[in-house]
Image: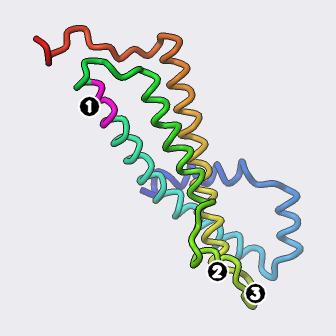
Amino acid sequence: MRRFTDPIGTRLLEFFTNEAVKEDANERLNDPGSAVREARELFLDYFARRTKTYLIASIVLLVVIGAIDYGTCGGVPNQSYGLALDLLGATVLARGLLKGPYAIAAESGQYLSESPPLRRALSEDAADGIWGIALLITGILVQFLAVAGVINFTLQNCPLYL
């Protein structure tokens, strides 16, 4: 999976790199090159995992809504497909904020130098944030296209009533 996601993840990292933060990291970290390489590798790994998870979740969600729509002979409004993606995107974004006591303790604990649990958590949150925003934007776009009449999933002759 990483063969497909690494080029996208690398471009996203380049896009979101803030020069001021980069300079600050170079001044504060003992070995900025090593820390940056580890953070990059962690992000790319989580991004690949999340890509697989969220693509599968999106497809399953849309298939379930499509099956309900088919079962009701087009009774589900077309905007529902976009709303489902919005709901998934909001859940993905909230995932980074909803933590249990073990995650909070590990991320906020004191370490002699750098904090590996915090680096992992930030990498996961970055991957979730990118996917959450992508799903929200896609959902809003699908809703807009459905309201504009560009997307229309109506069943002409419902096979359930023939």
What secondary structure is marked by label 1? Answer: helix
Q: In this view, does 137 lie above or below 104?
A: above
**Residue under label 2:** 105
- Left or right: where 15 falls relative to 25: left
Q: In this view, does 67 lie above or below 37?
A: above
Q: What number is the disc on residue 113? A: 3
User: Where residue 94 sits: x, y (%)?
Assistant: 59, 53
**Residue under label 1:** 67
Q: In this view, does 127 lie above or below 24?
A: above
Q: Which of marks 3 and 2 is in front?
A: 2
Residue bounds of the magenta highlight? 63-69
Residue type highlighted by circle 2: Ala
Q: Nearer the viewer, mark 3 or mark 1?
A: 1
User: Could you say which is closer to the camera, residue 48 or residue 65?
Assistant: 65
User: Where residue 6 sits: x, y (%)?
Assistant: 53, 55
In primary-sequence order, the first of circles 3 and 1 is 1
